[in-house]
Amino acid sequence: MVLEVQVQNRHEKLYRTSKHKQKDQHKTMLYAFHIVHADMHAQLIAEATPASSATQRLARPSVDASPQS
């Protein structure tokens, strides 16, 4: 009887620790997913965004300043 209780307690303890490990792994995976996802969004936005307006302003005067004679 005592042996059965010890075995049951050991199983419950192992089950609890495995559950905690699963939760920790899940949190780590979610964290990694969010980092990758945010990085991917930043990259897509950078690719989709045209040159910044400051860069365009700097580039325009050289084009517009062509001598008009």
Image (cartoon, rainbow, N blue to C red):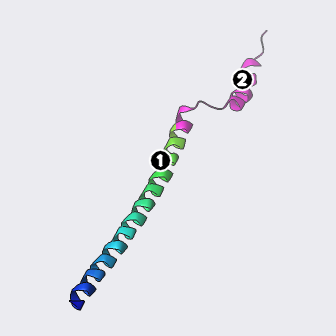
Residue 42, x across and y down, in percent: 54, 42
Q: Quadrant of the C terminus?
A: top right
- Up/down of 35 relative to 16, above or below: above
45 sits to left or right of 64: left
- Up/down of 46 relative to 62, above or below: below
Q: Amino acid at mark 1?
A: His
Q: Nearer the viewer, residue 15 or 35?
A: 15
Residue at the spot 50% in from the left edge and 38% down from the top edge: 44
Residue 26, x across and y down, in percent: 40, 60
Q: Amino acid at mark 2?
A: Arg
Query: What is the number of the mark on residue 68?
Result: none
Residue 6, x across and y down, in percent: 27, 87
Which is in the foreground here, disc 2 or disc 1?
Answer: 1
User: In what element is the residue under mark 1?
Assistant: helix
User: In what element is the residue under mark 2?
Assistant: helix
The residue wearing badge 1 is 37
Badge 2 crowding class, 10 Å Cα cut-off, few under 14, some 14 to 19, many 20 or more, is few
Residue at the spot 51% in from the left edge and 47% down from the top edge: 38
Mark closer to the chain start, 2 or 1: 1
Q: Residue furthest front?
A: 1
Q: What is the spatial separation of the Cα atoms under label 2 and label 1, in whole angstroms?
A: 35 Å
Q: Is residue 39 magenta?
A: no
Query: What is the number of the mark on residue 60?
Result: 2
- Up/down of 8 relative to 43, above or below: below
Give the dominant element type of the magenta stretch: helix, strand or loop.
helix
Residue 60, x across and y down, in percent: 72, 23
The magenta-colored residue range is 45-69
- Up/down of 59 relative to 68, above or below: below
